[in-house]
Image (spheres, rainbow, N blue to C red):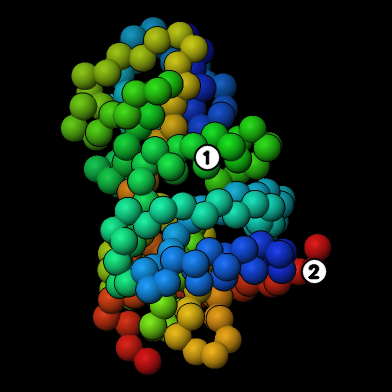
Amino acid sequence: MTIWIAGAKKEYRPGATLKEVAETERVENPVYVTAVVNEDYIKFGDFASVALKEGDRIEFVYFMGGGGYGVHQ
Amino acid sequence: MIRLKRRDAEKIVLHARACLPEEACGLIGGTVTADGDKNVEAVFPLTNADHSPEHFSMDPREQVAAIREMRALGLTPLGNFHSHPETPARPSGEDKRLAFDSAAVYMILSLAGEAPVLRAFHIEHGTAEEETLVITEE
């Protein structure tokens, strides 16, 4: 099946799970990633239970945070 | 090397000043050259979901909206920026610990001095290395 990952066209077996795709795409630190499949937001803990479908559009979005706490002059 | 247009650098500074006393954050999108240089073509100010002067986090829904806008413009997500209102433009322990995407450029803007200071870093496995940031006129 054809799916779109980060805007790029990719071929996967029908029914491939989000976990399988994340591993194949070598998503770094996936525990800190939210996957967006079309309009659905999926946390890492649910990746294995999500089977993808033809034409799905996926983005892997990293948690982004931090801050200046503890930086000294 | 990272190239950032002066108007985009000013957009980051304006957003950061508007968010004071809280930290500000956002995403940057652009293009990557064959030799790995990154040209920032657009800056996307986002909400600091923490609303804190010492911490920030982004709302995934805002991140996705910005990433989709980048894709519509033919741009690639390059990384992010955030401000340090009272401290220097270098990564804190928290910045390094929470940098999970080694492909991203991490820009930090300090508003601690009279003039704003913007620097860029590559952060991987908790180690930050400064990247060359060039401000261009166009």
Q: Check chain identity for marks 2 and 1: say if they share one.
A: yes
Under circle 2, the secondary element is loop
Residue at mark 2 to residue at mark 1: CA–CA distance? 25 Å
Q: Position of residue B88 (x, y in %)?
A: 43, 84
Q: How many marks?
A: 2
Camera-side residue of B23 and A72: B23
Residue A42 disc label: none
Q: Position of residue B75 (x, y in %)?
A: 65, 42
User: Would residue B115 be found to the left or right of residue B8 on screen?
Assistant: left
Q: Which residue is mark 1?
A: B67
Badge 1: chain ID: B
On screen, B35 above or below A21?
below
Badge 2: chain ID: B
Under circle 1, the secondary element is helix
Q: Amino acid at mark 2?
A: Glu
Q: Amino acid at mark 1?
A: Ile
**Residue displayed at 56% across by 29% down:** A7
Among the two numbered marks 2 and 1 on one chain, the one whose residue lies closer to the N terminus: 1
Q: Which residue is mark 2?
A: B137
**Residue displayed at 25% across by 33% down:** A43
**Residue displayed at 33% across by 49% down:** A63
Q: Residue furthest left?
A: A45
Q: Quadrant of the C terminus of chain B?
A: bottom right
Q: Residues within 10 Å of mark 2 (few under 14, many from 20)?
A: few
Camera-side residue of B29 and B35: B29
Q: Residue A5: tell me if it is visible.
A: yes
Quadrant of residue B11 within the rendered picture: bottom right
Q: Quadrant of the N terminus of chain B?
A: bottom right
